[in-house]
Amino acid sequence: MSDTPRPPGQALVEKMANLLWKEYPGHFGGALSKELAGPDTTGSRRLDFRISRYAPMAYVQEHVHKVQEQVYYVLEGEGVLTLDEARHLMRPHDFVYVPPGIRHSFHNTGTAGLVFLVITTPASDDEETL
């Protein structure tokens, strides 16, 4: 896959193995993600779709989105998702919807990798790009 963003409006068929893992800002200890469809891979401004794999003890620090909505869907492993002050144990086939304005974090508390899908819309949390 090219490092150049694709213009919006073009279809994309890709192999996940061609994409590199990245540790995004605010992610620590081996909290890695691959952008499957989003600004860098498809040119989309409305959608960011990732697969994430967190090593044991890895996490994303607590943060809040101004305008973005997210869905996490757990495929493998287990971890603790915090929404504001509430802690939730997440295991395979559990999912969560996180609306804008909710403080959240996700920690791998298990002994194996925590693998989950993340859908975020819009792709940017900058209100001016909407």
Image (cartoon, rainbow, N blue to C red):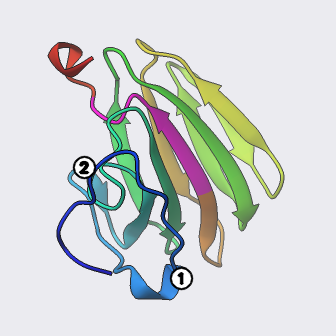
Q: Which residues are magenta?
A: 117-124
Q: Is residue 77 magenta?
A: no
User: Residue under circle 1?
Assistant: 15
Of residues 102 and 120, the one nearer the viewer is 120
User: Which quadrant holds residue 59?
Assistant: bottom left
Q: Give the alpha-carbon distance from disc 2 to disc 1, as whole Å.
A: 27 Å
Give the answer, above or below, for where 99 lies relative to 30.
above
What residue sits 71% from the left and 67% below the top?
77
Residue 112 at what x, y percent from top left? 65, 78
User: What is the three-letter code of the residue carrying label 2?
Assistant: Gly
Main SS of the magenta part reads strand
Dot 1 amino acid type: Lys
Q: Where, quadrant-wise, is the N terminus in this rendering?
A: bottom left
Magenta run includes residue 118:
yes
Q: Which mark is residue 26?
A: 2
Q: Give the number of the mark in front: 2 or 1.
A: 1
Q: Rate crowding at label 2 as few (under 14), some (14 to 19) or many (20 or more) other CA atoms within 10 Å.
A: few
Question: Residue 19, position in %: x, y?
Answer: 39, 79
Figure check: 69 above or below 7: above
Q: Quadrant of residue 75?
A: bottom right
